[in-house]
Amino acid sequence: MTIAVNTRFLLKDRLEGIGWFTYETVRRLVQKHPEHQFLFFFDRPFDKQFIFADNVQPIVIFPPARHPFLFYLWFEFGVADALKKHKADVFLSTDGFLSLKTTVPTLLVIHDLAHVHFPNQVKFSEQKYYNYFMPKFAKRANRIATVSEYSKIDIHQQYHVPLNNIDVVYNGVRKAFQPVDEITQTAIKAKYSKGEDYFFYIGAVHPRKNIHRVITAFDQFKQKTNASTKLLIAGRFAWQTGVVKDAYDQATFKADIDFLNYVADEEVPLLMASALGFVYVSLFEGFGIPLLEAMHCEVPIITANVSSMPEVVGDAAITVPPESIEAIKNAMVVLYQNGAKRSALIELGKRQRNNFSWNQTAEKLTKSLIAISN
């Protein structure tokens, strides 16, 4: 079987959510199925590290698809022509987009419908594109895979896709995320937090990620406890970050808040594993891979009680209403003051994390591909 894959998010040193999903799942598909030929569709020059085996043929398709008009050109002309030219049997697209022009059976991975629930937090041009094309993509796909039961129901309700045509494949976590010893923790704290304990966040800095409320809650935590604890925020500044900057400017303890921006991949697991607690109280997530990373690092979690996050953490986190600064602050106080609670959450996380792995994800994607190829 010839399997074409949309690999445009495999970008050297710039892997983020969809990129990591593509990397971890497709690498396993390729290596476990040498009997199949894989066509990797890139939208720019690729790095050889992403050609995982001899059964991969990389194909660069013009133009680079980083704008709605270019999305349309890339998928409706470039991808459609490549699928026909190379006689693909199936097409796996991991970024929620597909080609409406092709008749090749397509498995579409939709990670979430954040643009539906938070339209004002998406650029206008992209919002118009999503609103027009996403329902068409969902209808055109021969099968849809998504990363949580929450997203499965959401896709069904928003786009009227039958539930039996949507597969939940979940996410996994990289092996690099694991506990570290006290010597490493001390070194990381010396490097990043002046030797002090810290709460940690990793992800895009964006209003939907609720960082502005985390900052205000942390400021109130500091006022209540007089702790020397820091807040480290790792991740790129995305769109509409004014409320985040405003919260920071208004914070009394801004000297204890550090925006790390982009952190090298090898440093992120160390930062996670050395944290007093991981704070991830987004307003909406289709899954939330950092929650799973924290469980593997054996770090206690504060997360939101909405969308997919309770599904991911089970009872292995303190869950709070994400719009309640008071609740976020109180959860920080608990993690700071209550060692027994921290330990209990860590133990619960050790059990909860076993429900997710990239191997399981790749196996489920394989079944979905087989289903559309028959």
Image (cartoon, rainbow, N blue to C red):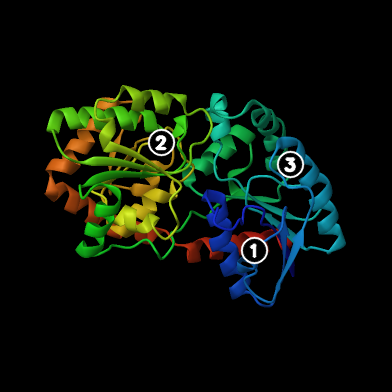
Can you tell which mark lies on residue 71? 3
Say which amino acid is labelled 3. Answer: Phe
In front of the other: label 1 or label 3? 1
Whether residue 115 is visible to the viewer of this picture, yes or no, is yes
Residue 324, which numbered label? none
What whole-number distance in Å separates the C-alpha atoms at marks 1 and 3? 21 Å
- Distance Cα–Cα, label 3 vs label 2: 27 Å
Disc number placed over residue 282 in the picture, else none: 2
Look at the picture and state if 308 lies above or below 58: above
State the CA–CA distance, disc 1 to disc 2. Answer: 33 Å
First along the sequence among labels 1 and 3: 1
Image x and y of residue 174, in percent: 44, 62
Relative to residue 72, is residue 49 depicted above or below?
below
Residue, disc 1? 47
For the point 28% across and 49% down, the residue is 316
Residue 366 versus residue 195 in the image, above or below: below
Mark 1 residue type? Asp
Residue type highlighted by circle 2: Ser
Mark 1 vs mark 2: which is more N-terminal?
1
Residue 84: give x, y in percent of width and height.
Answer: 86, 58
The answer to which of 32 and 128 lies nearer the viewer is: 128
Q: Quadrant of residue 332?
A: top left
At label 1, counting other C-alpha atoms closer than 10 Å, the crowd grade (few under 14, some 14-19, many 20 or more) is few
* Image-based side of 66 in relation to 73, left or right: left
Q: Residue at x 31, y 58 (%)?
A: 297
**Camera-side residue: 211 or 117?**
211
User: Which type of secondary structure does the marked residue at label 2 adopt?
Assistant: loop
